[in-house]
């Protein structure tokens, strides 16, 4: 706003501004910055920018943003896969322990049944053979269930492990690109 425009708005303020020249105040001594001199004046070497930056500054920013997203996604993927792999391996260990117990039970019921059949062949009646057949069959069915679960689990561990290993290899490639670049 010029002084003539201010005259109409507030005549007393306009007279005060016109009467006193503008005062320039200095900042306090602790806020004074040294004068910035161009490198050529101060004797320092001038850092030269390349004649051409492929893609410009925007391209560099976009590339850095993409790499940052790649790293974040890699970390997230590893964080998601690690617990899945640990759970699958834990389940596998439990199934193998159960397999050992079930195999021992199935073998024991098979020995008892075989002994009862041999006794029957020799002319002795060992008791309820149909009950022994049922126990042996139940043990074998449990063995089959554990084997099926273990087979499914091994396939799960394999798929999870392969995905985790592939992700680790990709992370290593990202790391190598960072060290090369």
Image (cartoon, rainbow, N blue to C red):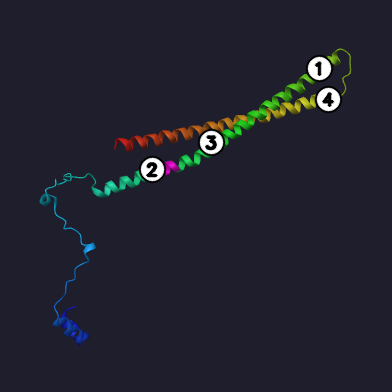
Vertical relation: 53 (above or below) 8: above
Q: Which mark is residue 85?
A: 3
Vertical relation: 13 (above or below) 149: below
Mark 4 and mark 1 in contact (Cβ < 8 Å)? no
Which quadrant would the C terminus be assigned to in this image? top left
Q: CA distance from mark 4 to mark 2?
A: 65 Å
Q: Is residue 167 magenta?
A: no
Give the mark, 3 or 4, whose residue is nearer the N terminus. Answer: 3
Q: List the residue tagged with mark 1.
A: 115
Q: Residue at x 43, y 35 (%)?
A: 168
Q: Is residue 152 left or right of residue 117?
A: left
Give the mark, 1 or 4, whose residue is nearer the N terminus. Answer: 1
Q: Residues within 10 Å of mark 1 (few under 14, many from 20)?
A: few
Vertical relation: 157 (above or below) 29: above
- Camera-nearest residue between 49 and 14: 14
Which quadrant would the N terminus be assigned to in this image? bottom left
Give the mark, 4 or 2, whose residue is nearer the N terminus. Answer: 2
Q: Which residues are magenta?
A: 69-75
Q: Residues within 10 Å of mark 4 (few under 14, many from 20)?
A: few
Give the mark, 2 or 3, whose residue is nearer the N terminus. Answer: 2
Q: Quadrant of residue 35?
A: bottom left
Q: List the residue tagged with mark 2.
A: 70
Residue 144 % position (x, y): 68, 28
Q: CA distance from mark 2 to mark 3?
A: 22 Å
Q: CA distance from mark 1 to mark 2?
A: 66 Å
Residue 150 % position (x, y): 62, 30
Q: CA distance from mark 3 to mark 1?
A: 45 Å
Q: Residue at x 21, y 64 (%)?
A: 29
Where disc 1 sits, the SS reads helix
Q: List the residue tagged with mark 4.
A: 130
Q: Residues within 10 Å of mark 2 (few under 14, many from 20)?
A: some
Where disc 2 sits, the SS reads helix
């Amino acid at each position: 706003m010029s002084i003539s425009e201010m005259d109409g708005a507030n005549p007393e303020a306009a007279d005060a501004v016109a009467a006193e020249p503008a005062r320039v105040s200095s900042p306090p001594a602790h806020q004074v910055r040294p004068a910035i001199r161009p490198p050529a004046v101060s004797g320092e070497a001038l850092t030269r920018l390349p004649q051409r930056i492929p893609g410009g500054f925007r391209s560099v920013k976009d590339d850095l943003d993409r790499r940052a997203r790649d790293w974040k996604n890699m970390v997230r993927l590893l964080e998601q896969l690690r617990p899945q792999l640990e759970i699958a391996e834990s389940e596998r260990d439990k199934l193998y322990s159960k397999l050992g117990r079930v195999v021992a039970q199935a073998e024991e019921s098979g020995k008892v049944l075989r002994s009862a059949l041999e006794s029957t062949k020799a002319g002795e009646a060992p008791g309820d053979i149909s009950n022994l057949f049922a126990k042996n069959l139940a043990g074998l069915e449990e063995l089959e269930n554990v084997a099926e679960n273990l087979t499914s689990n091994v396939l799960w561990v394999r798929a999870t492990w392969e995905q985790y290993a592939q992700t680790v290899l990709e992370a290593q490639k990202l790391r190598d690109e960072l060290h090369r670049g």
